[in-house]
Every structure is written in C-alpha cells, then in structure tokens.
Image: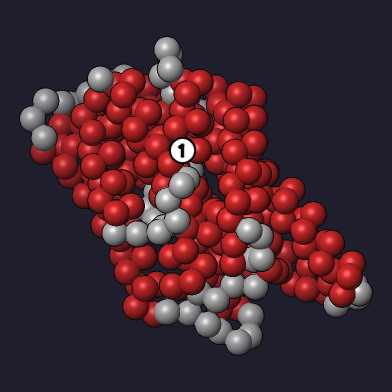
Amino acid sequence: MIELLSLYLAFILGMNNAGLLSGTLVAGGMSYRNSIIIIIIGFIIGFVIEGEKIANTLESISKIDIEIQLVVTSILLTIFTIIGMPVSMVNLLIAAHIGKALAINAEIDLTILASILIAWIIAPLVTILSSIILYEILKRMVNNISLLSLNKFYSIATLVTTFYMAYALSANNIALLSIDSLSFILPFMAIIGMINKKVAFVISEDIVGQSRLTILSTFIASSSLLWLFTQFSIPISLTQMVLAGLIVNNLHKRPRIYNKSKLLMLVTSSILSTITSLLIAYYLPP
C-alpha cells in the first residue's frame, strides 16, 4: 500500500510542482515539448546521483509508519492540482508526518525538525534577495550583447538552468518519497504526471507577467538553494522558492504586472494547505 501511495504521490507531484517549472519556461520562450525533455533528463540523473541524501528524512524526524501521511498528502495535493493551484508536496508531507507523530506521542527529533522549519523560512527570503541581485547583474550583461548573441545566450542559459533545476528537484523533492523496492520508478511517475498543463500556466499566465531575465535569475537562485539544502538532507519547497523569486522579481522591475487576487489566493493556499495537512493527520484515528 505504501509503495502505491508513494508512486501516486510522485505522479501528482509531476502534475503540480513540476508543471510550475515547465510553465515558467514556456513563458520565457521555450516550447512546452522541449522543456519537458530537459526536465525528464534532469529528473532521472538527479534522483540517481543524489536522491539518497533525502531518502530517509521522514524517518530521521520521527520513526513512525508513513501510510497515513502519504494518504493525507495525496488527497490534498490531488485537490489542489485539480483546481490548478501549485502547492508544496514537501510541506504537506512533513506537516502530516509531524501531525501523526504528535497524535501518537511518538518521539520527534527536534534538532532536525527545527533545521527544516528554519530552512523553510529563510529559503524564500534568500531566493528573493539572490534572484534580484542576479537579475541586476544579468540585465547589465545583456545590455552589451547584440540581439543575435542575446538569443543564443538565453537559449543556452535556459537549457542549462532548467536541467539543473530538474536535477535538484528530483534529488530533493522526489527522493523524499523513496521506498526500498520501487524507488527507481518515482522519477518516471513524476515525468508521466507532467502531461498536465493546467498548473503549469497558473504562474506564467494567470498571476505574473514574466520576462526571460526574471525567470532565469529566479531559476538560478532557486536551483542553487535547492541543491545546497539537499547536501544537508533538508527537504525544501521548490514551489515557495520559485514563486517568491518570480513574484518579487516582477515587482522589482518595471512595469509591474501581476494579478492581485490570484497572488493572494496562491499565498493563502500555500499556508492553509500545510496547516490542514498537519491537523488532518493529527485527528485521524491511528
């Protein structure tokens, strides 16, 4: 049962969080097909090379059965995917794990938990700061490049950054779902889930108007942080980092283009979904 739940959750993750990645690439000028190909390659390599660094994180927080947590996370992530709203699978799963541990009075490693919670707070802030700095650096660079060279620069930089982001996402987020017998299938399930475009275009079309520079600078900042936290076995939300970087970067540049109602809905759903996951897991019967 746990194996099937993990595979399903990887599939839904592909539809939800990875769709966010491909959607912003489309907004930056890359075709949906090409973005999917690059992400597929990054998914597989990232999981194989560095997935083991995150694989045992849930057990390190609290050594309890994870079936209820997977059920709660799967249901919530499915609901938000159906309505086309990107949320963090990492936040949902860890919140449910904490809720379940509290409900049965299981031992929780507070040191590890504290490091994860602190990372969740600082990661979006660091992404915002670093993406704005990168945006200003890249803007000055491209001002001195010819139009032909500029197109080549964007094409190469987007491909490399996309691969790196997918690599880090797989090593961090997808690897969190690792199970002994079927772990190698997880990245492929996420890939299959990426056929969904509904969530992919929530950010690129419904909320903010992006430029290639804002996308590139945010992706470099987000992927670097995602990879860095992986080295310390800390699962982190790709969704929160990318959204924070894209939105604030968009507000930083001129003109400012964004949908206030959609933005508020996105922030609210991110917070409430995490709290809901914890409460459901806590109050469900053991």
At a point 37% along the width and 41% down the height, the residue shown is 12
Screen quadrant of the C terminus: top left
At a point 18% along the width and 37% down the height, the residue shown is 281
Q: Residues within 10 Å of mark 1 (few under 14, many from 20)?
A: some
> So how many labels did they put on this image?
1
**In the image, residue 256 above or below residue 35:** below
**In this rendering, does residue 65 appear at all?**
no
Left or right: 135 with respect to 236? right
Picture coordinates of residue 194 (x, y %)?
47, 45
**In the image, residue 226 above or below residue 177:** below
Left or right: 111 with respect to 39? left
Residue 142 sits in quarter: bottom right
At a point 72% along the width and 56% down the height, the residue shown is 158
**In this rendering, does residue 93 appear at all?**
yes
The residue pinned by badge 1 equals 192
At a point 36% along the width and 65% down the height, the residue shown is 266
Q: Secondary structure at mark 1?
A: helix
Extreme residue in the left direction: 285
Screen quadrant of the N terminus: top left
Picture coordinates of residue 152 (x, y %)?
84, 62
Q: Amino acid at mark 1?
A: Ile
**In the image, residue 111 above or below residue 22:** above
